[in-house]
Amino acid sequence: MVFQYPLELIGTFFFAISGALAMQDKEHDWFAAAFTGFLTAIGGGTIRDMMLGSYPLVWIGDINFLYAVLIGVGAAILFFRVFIRLRRTFMLFDTLGISFFTILGVEKAIGLGVQPEIAAIMGMFTAVMGGVIRDTLTNELPVIFRKEIYATACLAGAIVYLLIDIHTPLERNYNLSISILVIICIRLVALKFKLALPGFRKT
């Protein structure tokens, strides 16, 4: 699909920036930032492909994904001072990354013939596991375990995509755009108003 491929590269680019910027308050060098950006960008897709038995892994089979990572990390390093002066920059790039990766993960899973329910979970995994790896490397509590709407936004967008795909004649590129915007809107609204799911408490 013509529209899907550039979105995959853009999502990889955004997540590479997100991973590199996560090192801004750590006492590490640029190589550590680059390594974190790399694992953040390819982590979710790698785990998804391994779980689905899809080989070669997407970033190994297509060198353009490695270039997207390198450009993203380079942008984070070169424009670091610009990025850190902008409030919420890290959250913005992370939100863009998870929105693209969720829907593209669903697309990949559907293309491999799995059931829609599994495809939704694979889309969520694609989006959040890179962030889990990033937070673990930077010694932070992974964002999916914090009291905020993150993985839920991804799952909601994946479900929207599948419902539109299955029950409407809407062209797939429009479906991709709508579903990505759903995730972005849910995530940004949740951040702005500090929305969260109810806490889990034992009785």
Image (cartoon, grey):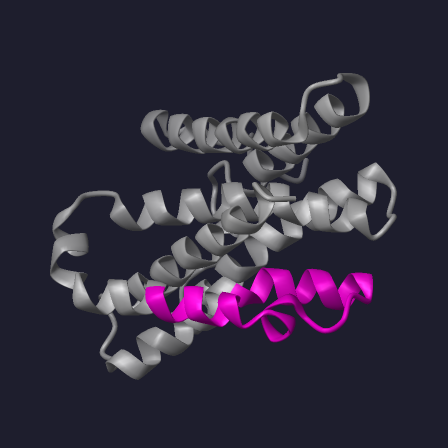
Q: Work out which residue is located at the far front of the displayed protein and give it.
A: 2
Task: Tell which of 139 and 150 is nearer to you.
Answer: 150
Which quadrant is home to the C terminus? top right
Whether the magenta-drawn stretch holds residue 44 is answered as yes
In x, y percent, where is residue 86? Answer: 16, 46
Task: Tell which of 81 and 6 is nearer to you.
Answer: 6
In x, y percent, where is residue 40? Answer: 47, 65
Judge whether residue 189 can be spotted in this image.
yes
Q: Residue at x 45, y 65 (%)?
A: 134
Query: How many marks on residues?
Result: 0
Task: Tell which of 154 and 113 is nearer to you.
Answer: 113
In the picture, measured across the screen, residue 1 lies left or right of residue 38, that is right
Judge whether residue 37 can be spotted in this image.
no
- What's drawn in magenta, residue-wise? 42-71
Q: State whether residue 88 is above or below residue 56.
A: above
Magenta: main secondary structure = helix
Q: Residue at x 57, y 50 (%)?
A: 5
Which quadrant is home to the N terminus? top right
In x, y percent, where is residue 4? Answer: 59, 44
In x, y percent, where is residue 23? Answer: 29, 68
Q: State whether residue 84 is above or below residue 119.
A: below
Q: Residue at x 36, y 48 (%)?
A: 93
Location of residue 3 by image quarter: top right
Q: Residue at x 35, y 25 (%)?
A: 193
Whether the magenta-drawn stretch holds residue 99 is answered as no
Q: State whether residue 131 is above or below residue 95.
A: below
In the picture, measured across the screen, residue 164 lies left or right of residue 102, that is right
In the picture, measured across the screen, residue 161 lies left or right of residue 19, that is right
